[in-house]
Amino acid sequence: MKKITKVIITAALISTMNLTALAADIPGESLPENATYESMNITENLISPILCEVENGLGYGEANAKARQTIYNAVTSGQTNGYGYAHLMAIARNSIFQYRDIYLRPAFYKEIETQVQTVISDLITAVENGTLTYEEARKQSYIKILQWVNPTFTLEDMQGDFCYWDIPPIDSAYFNRARKLLLEAQTRRFTQ
């Protein structure tokens, strides 16, 4: 009887560990601007297993389809605390895209994170010290990155309607890494 009890307890512990290992977080740098902490948590609870699959090679289209179905079912059954489909799917799409992009280009992400860290090091320090808010630093980091790519870029290139802006072409991963680094600095500030 003791052996059976040990086997059952061991199996339960192993299955709990496996479920814990299959949880993936939504990266803060991928959140849309209108996302709240609560909506992020709701989305994360719904699509965490899908994000794990993306980390292991599941394609964007299939992952997005699974997320759409999961979120649709949760919204229609009233399990989203009033958050709508579009709001939660924006969070899901962004996080799935980031997980997939990092899966496909891990070396690129590591390389540009190092580059961006150098370019915006003063902003990272300012956020960590509390002299700049995350939002102010985020806006300034975008401009610094654009000027790093094209030294002749000025704020005058961003006048008028968005479609007429003369912005240097750059991979969105640069801005993603800037947000990540600034969010990490903000976290360090509040945990010190």
Image: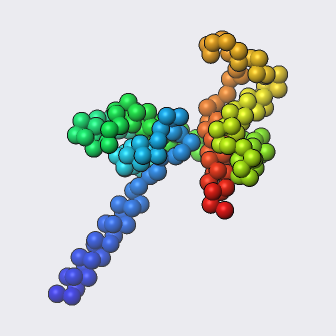
Colour scheme of the picture: rainbow
Residue 59 seen in this snapshot: no
Question: Residue 95, how many percent across, how many down?
Answer: 48, 40
Q: Quadrant of residue 118?
A: top right
Q: Residue at x 46, y 51 (%)?
A: 25
Q: Residue at x 39, y 56 (%)?
A: 22
Q: Quadrant of residue 137?
A: top right
Q: Residue at x 34, y 33 (%)?
A: 84
Question: Residue 80, how many percent across, how many down?
Answer: 32, 42
Q: Is residue 154 above or below residue 109?
A: above
Left or right of residue 21: residue 1: left
Q: Residue at x 63, y 41 (%)?
A: 179
Question: Residue 74, how many percent across, how many down?
Answer: 27, 41
Q: Quadrant of residue 142?
A: top right
Q: Nearer the viewer, residue 79 or 17?
A: 79
What residue occupies the far right of the structure in this picture?
152
Q: Nearer the viewer, residue 191 or 55?
A: 191
Left or right of residue 19: residue 162: right
Left or right of residue 12: residue 143: right
Q: Is residue 119 above or below residue 168?
A: below
Q: Is residue 5 above or below residue 76?
A: below
- Look at the image and tell me in which quarter the N terminus lies: bottom left
- Look at the image and tell me in which quarter the C terminus lies: bottom right
What residue occupies the far left of the structure in this picture?
1
Question: Residue 11, how many percent across, how many down?
Answer: 28, 72
Q: How many tags in the picture?
A: 0
Residue 12 seen in this snapshot: yes
